[in-house]
Amino acid sequence: MKIVFMGTPDFAVPCLERLIGSGHEVLGVFTQPDKKVGRKQIITPPPVKVAAEKHGITVFQPNTLKDGKGLEIIKELAPEVIVVVAYGKILPREILDYPKYGCVNVHASLLPKYRGAAPIQWAVINGDKETGVTIMQMADGIDTGDMLLVKKMEIGINETSEELFERLSVIGADALIEALTLIENGEAVPKPQPEGDFGYASMISKDMSAIDWSKSAFEIHNLIRGLQTWPAASTVINGKTVKILKSVLSGETGNEAGEIVNNKNVLTVSCGDGKCIDILEIQPDGKKKMDIKSFLAGNQIKIGAKIGE
């Protein structure tokens, strides 16, 4: 099929690559404008732009789709379907309605659960055992369209959001090609999403970083793996804020929330439910990330000391 692709981050790249390799004709790619990244504020193109240009595909980076110019470009390209994967802009009704087969979205959750911007992180933060990818027909509203295909997968107890991103991006690409084949063959059966409040996956923010040690070990462990690598969960140790990048649930039990239970090659911390977590990887402010053994070699942390204060 003749396709216009809309996407921006790393998550969308496998979908674009699979479309190109599967024999579909990608007429053009829409992505977000280049932006300044890092402390040096270097202007950096989105990953989808890099991938598209590698294959010689024309890239469009409009600041808005509300002025009608995006629709003009799409009419010139004349796609049969528009594929949208984490593009980051709301498509106007005239764009949704233009292609023969409409606009198809790859969403990284089991809709209608986790509509919104950060479904992968919230699935991990909430301790879900299962997630997946939904291919849906786009409609007005945020992630509210009819479902065309659903692929499920388990979430590992120690799996981070970054690791889950990588797995879902590959599964999403496979599901996309399968759904497009169903559409092209007239075999797709759109299924309306159930009505009700199934939770909204709002954007992740730095305000979520600080660990509340009064919460359960499971909740804290989920926050740590859910916020990896940005903005990362954080706490205060010896009066300094550090990022906690990796943890596991510990077999030890503790006393007061935030109390150090073990400091021998691992940092075991008591949580609000009396259970503990082991901190395995850490990043002091202004320094590179390091394993906990390296951190403990340069920092004296006593048994019974409290962190997070």
Image (spheres, grey):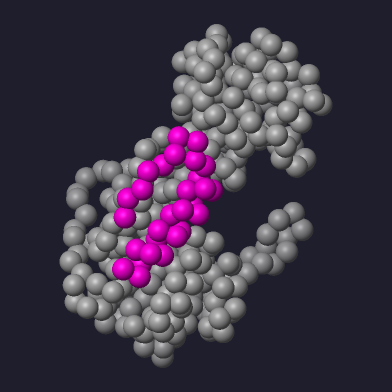
x then y, percent, for residue 31: 51, 71
The residue range painted magenta reads 151-178
Q: Nearer the viewer, residue 87 or 2?
A: 2
| Residue at left offset 74%, top offset 54% | 39
Residue 277 point in image, percent of width and height = 55, 23
Q: Nearer the viewer, residue 69 or 126?
A: 126
Residue at 73% x, 28% y is: 293
Extreme residue in the bottom direction: 76
Q: Quadrant of residue 133?
A: bottom left
Q: Residue 248's quadrant in the figure? A: top right
- Quarter of the picture containing the C terminus is top right
Is residue 61 in view from this perspective?
A: yes
Q: Tell me if I can see residue 139 in this picture.
A: no
Q: How many tags in the picture?
A: 0
* Residue 66 appears left or right of 51: left
- Whether the magenta-drawn stretch holds residue 161 is answered as yes
Left or right: 176 as drawn, with respect to 158: left
Q: Quadrant of the N terminus?
A: bottom left
Is most of the magenta stretch helix, strand or loop? helix
**Position above or below: 49 against 216:** below
Q: Position of residue 197 (x, y in %)?
A: 26, 43
Q: Position of residue 127 (x, y in %)?
A: 41, 35
Residue that appears at 56% across and 81% down: 55
Question: Is residue 163 placed above or below 80 in the rendered structure?
Answer: above
Membership of 36 in magenta stretch: no
Rendered position, 137 above or below 203: below
